[in-house]
Amino acid sequence: MNAAAPIAFYFDFSSPYAYIASEWIEALAARRGRTVRWHAMLLGASFQVTDIKSPVAYPLKREYVMHDFERSARFAGVPLKMPEPFPIATQNAARVFWSLNDVEGPVRAACWARHCLRAYFARGVNLSDALALKGLATEFGLDPTQAEGIWTNPEWKARLKAANDSAIACGVFGVPFFIIDGEAFWGNDRRAQIERLLESGPF
Amino acid sequence: MNAAAPIAFYFDFSSPYAYIASEWIEALAARRGRTVRWHAMLLGASFQVTDIKSPVAYPLKREYVMHDFERSARFAGVPLKMPEPFPIATQNAARVFWSLNDVEGPVRAACWARHCLRAYFARGVNLSDALALKGLATEFGLDPTQAEGIWTNPEWKARLKAANDSAIACGVFGVPFFIIDGEAFWGNDRRAQIERLLESGPF
């Protein structure tokens, strides 16, 4: 099998649909000999540039998606209990992600992402709370004080900003967002189309 | 088999995703002993109330969906060639729909809907052009002058407005929108979830 390009997977730590997708994308990719390159981002940064708003910003849509988040998770077989508060600021978890990515490699960063996404959406751990995030860092085998040192460090703040800018430049206006061999897919609900593309190429 | 409630299917004549769904919903329902009750509406009326905008109103999202419309159609095996102009005003086709619905019944109205949707999305017939719409009426076996008399008649204008108000009251903020046994589903991409619900009940 030829070495195929990795799947680019953009997510925000506060997106339920990105969380659901994060639970199936690795296995789906691996079945077709692909790897996944995870990209943590702040969706709010994209919203500011594009003038797009979160679905939960509109009362009627909010009511629908708050039900659909959990229903879509059940449909995918993924444990999800909508956390309180929701949505939350996720820049600290994202800065740790990029630090791990650049220092220890993308696989370690992806593990951190899964650890945090599951903590927030299955256990209700508030990622925007510094103490709770330090607790997750400890669980993950990081020194909690060093972890805090990462998310307060201008270098990693700048790294996350660059990652946001790069995502926007790639056309990312929502999450989960996938780019595979130049084809862009937006949404947890594009799973079947992604599967078809990996199986038999562009359609 | 007990007589199960019809599936409520909300669409706008100018929505590519609603067109795609219109091509699979009847067969999917029939396989489970269900009928479909079609509801023509003007999505713009819902957008005005909810402050939601069309995906094509945002440049980055527009670029994505213009590609995704045709790709999703190919994925579903539905012929779709994005028409010019797009989007268009569809109140005339929708008024004829409600007149047919109230006078000749919902099955005849659904046939008109499919006729117009296919004309616009597969053949590029501009439904907002009175002459073109009269041509479609003739193909459908209607007298074209009588058809025009319907869409200029205050009674059918009011009927469409009532249908829009009713859709908004039911929580419809986008199309296609389905309500099945009290469960709401938004989007052509909810097909698999709808199938699961019809097969084995709420999940």
Image: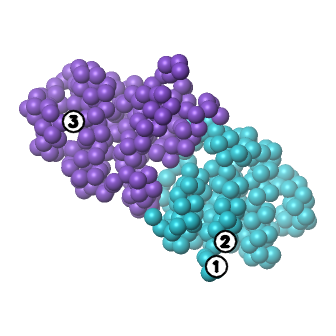
Chain colours: A cyan, B purple
**What residue is shown at x 70% (from left), y 61% (from top)?**
A27
Q: Chain of mark 1?
A: A
B145 above or below A9? above
Q: Which mark is residue B27?
A: none
Instruction: Provide residue B94's location: percent of width, then percent of height.
Output: 27, 34
Q: Nearer the viewer, residue B96 or A44?
A: B96
Badge 3 vs badge 2, beta-carbon distance below 8 Å: no
**What residue is shown at x 79% (from left), y 77% (from top)?**
A103
The disc labelled 2 sits on which kind of residue? Gly
Q: Is residue B202 left or right of residue A47?
A: right
Instruction: Provide residue A25's location: percent of width, then percent of height.
Output: 66, 60
Instruction: Provide residue B71's location: percent of width, then percent of height.
Output: 43, 59
| Mark nearer the viewer, 1 or 2 | 1
| Mark nearer the viewer, 3 or 2 | 2
Residue A9 occupies quadrant: bottom right
Residue B66 occupies quadrant: bottom left
Q: Which mark is residue A33?
A: 2
Residue A10 occupies quadrant: bottom right
Task: Give the residue number, with chain letter if any, for mark 1.
Answer: A1
Q: Chain of mark 2?
A: A
**What residue is shown at x 54% (from left), y 38% (from top)?**
B195
Q: Which mark is residue B92?
A: 3
Toward the bottom, the furthest residue is A2
